[in-house]
């Protein structure tokens, strides 16, 4: 199914706004960006380390 021109431009404008918002946020926190990335990596990394093995175990081993 092919999207209309209006949908095409809506998606592109939304992507552009998202990129612009990201650039603005980075400009405000550029001096603290390394700490933010470290904290975000720790939070999401620990989530992966703690949750994904449990979910895989439930999917592979659980009877119900």
Image (cartoon, grey):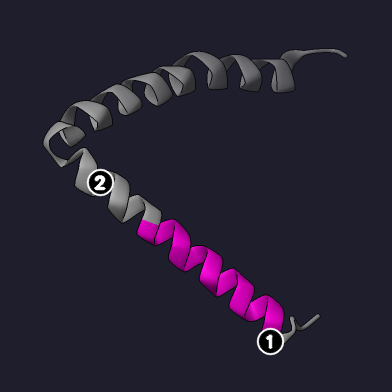
Residue that mark 2 sits on: 26
Front residue of this view, candidates 16 and 46:
16
SS of the residue under disc 2? helix
Q: Given contact means CB atoms under 8 Å apart, are the residues at marks 2 and 1 in contact?
A: no
Rendered position, 37 above or below 15: above
Where does residue 38 sit, x and y in percent of width and height? Answer: 24, 26
10 within the magenta span: yes
Q: Residue at x 74, y 81 (%)?
A: 3
* Closer-to-camera residue (39/21): 21
Q: Is residue 64 above or below residue 35?
A: above
Q: Secondary structure at mark 1?
A: helix
- At x 16% / y 31%, what residue is drawn? 32
Residue 30 quadrant: top left
Above or below, 54 relative to 15: above
Q: Would you say 33 lies left or right of 63 here?
A: left
Q: Real-space Cα distance between discs 2 and 1? A: 32 Å
Residue 6 picture location, percent across and down: 69, 82
**Can you say which quadrant of the picture contains the C terminus?**
top right
Report the predominant secondary structure element of the magenta stretch: helix
Q: What span is colored magenta in the figure?
A: 5-20
Q: Identify the residue at horizontal 54%, vertical 64% (top origin).
A: 14
User: How would you rate the neighbour count of disc 2 (Cα within 10 Å): few for under 14, some for 14-19, many for 20 or more?
Assistant: few
Task: Say which residue appears at 47% left-offset and 19% top-offset.
Answer: 47
Q: Position of residue 10 (x, y in %)?
A: 62, 72
Seen as rendered, the residue at the extreme left is 31
Which quadrant holds residue 55? top right
Query: Is-magenta flag for residue 8?
Result: yes
Disc 1 packing (10 Å; few <14; some 14–19; many ≥20) = few
Q: Residue 40, percent across and down?
A: 34, 27
In front of the other: 16 or 60: 16
Between disc 2 and disc 1, whose residue precedes? 1
Query: What residue would you read off at disc 1?
Result: 5
């Amino acid at each position: 199914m092919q999207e209309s021109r209006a949908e095409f431009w809506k998606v592109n404008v939304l992507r552009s706004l998202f990129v612009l918002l990201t650039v603005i946020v980075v400009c405000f926190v550029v001096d603290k960006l390394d700490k933010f990335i470290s904290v975000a990596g720790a939070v999401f990394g620990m989530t992966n380390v703690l949750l994904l093995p449990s979910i895989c175990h439930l999917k592979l081993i659980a009877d119900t």
